[in-house]
Amino acid sequence: MPPVGDLFGPHTAGQRSSEDSGYVAPVNRDSGLMRGKRMIMGGRKPIRDALYVAALPAIRFDPVMKAVFDRLKAKGKPGKVALVAVMRRMIVILNARMRDYRATVLDR
């Protein structure tokens, strides 16, 4: 299995490039006046699957992720939408940790 940095590419946290590049970005299905349901597709399916599997225990056992999920559910968002928001939050956190780790390693 390749390292996490090879999976996500050379992104920095705060640029939102990993979400926008299609890992869990919503895709619309609009045509003319018809508005379809948004869904996540495209991008790298193995990464999306791994994030989904990791997000399920995160919303049960991680207090921060549980708070994000519960807040969105309280606002009336569907469960899958709230779960995708947790997945996106996990990408941002992972990119920040990678950025900090690289800065620490380069300082040595």
Image: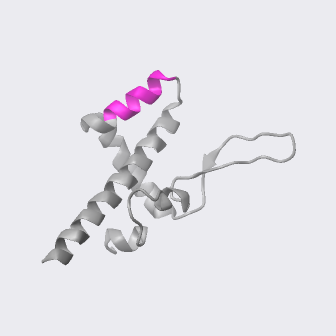
Query: Which residue is located at x 31 percent, y 42 percent?
Result: 58
Q: Is 21 drawn above or below residue 56 in the view shown?
A: below
| Residue lying at the far left of the rendered structure | 108
Horizontal and vertical percent position of residue 2: 34, 75
Q: Is residue 1 above or below residue 57?
A: below
Looking at this rendering, what residue extends furthest in the front direction? 107
Q: Residue furthest right?
A: 32
- Is the magenta region chiefly helix, strand or loop? helix
The number of numbered discs placed on residues in the rendered structure image is 0
**Residue in the picture at 38% in, 74% down:** 6
The N terminus is located in which quarter? Answer: bottom left
Image coords of residue 55 (percent x, y): 37, 45
Give percent across and percent down for residue 23: 51, 58
Does the magenta segment cover residue 14? no
- Kindly identify the residue that appears in the image at 36 percent across and 42 percent down: 56
Q: Nearer the viewer, residue 80 or 77?
A: 77
Left or right: residue 65 versus residue 28 is: left
Whether residue 36 is situated above or below residue 49 in the rendered picture: above
Question: Picture coordinates of residue 24 (x, y %)?
Answer: 52, 53
Q: Quadrant of the C terminus?
A: bottom left
Given residues 101 and 70, the one toward you in this image is: 101
Left or right, residue 62 beside residue 13:
left
Q: Quadrant of residue 62?
A: top left
Q: Is residue 73 above or below residue 18?
A: above
The span picked out in magenta is 66-75
User: Is 71 within the magenta?
Assistant: yes
Judge by depth and name the residue closer to the eye, 71 or 38: 71
Specify the color scheme: one colour
* Residue pictured at 29% horizontal, 64% vertical: 98
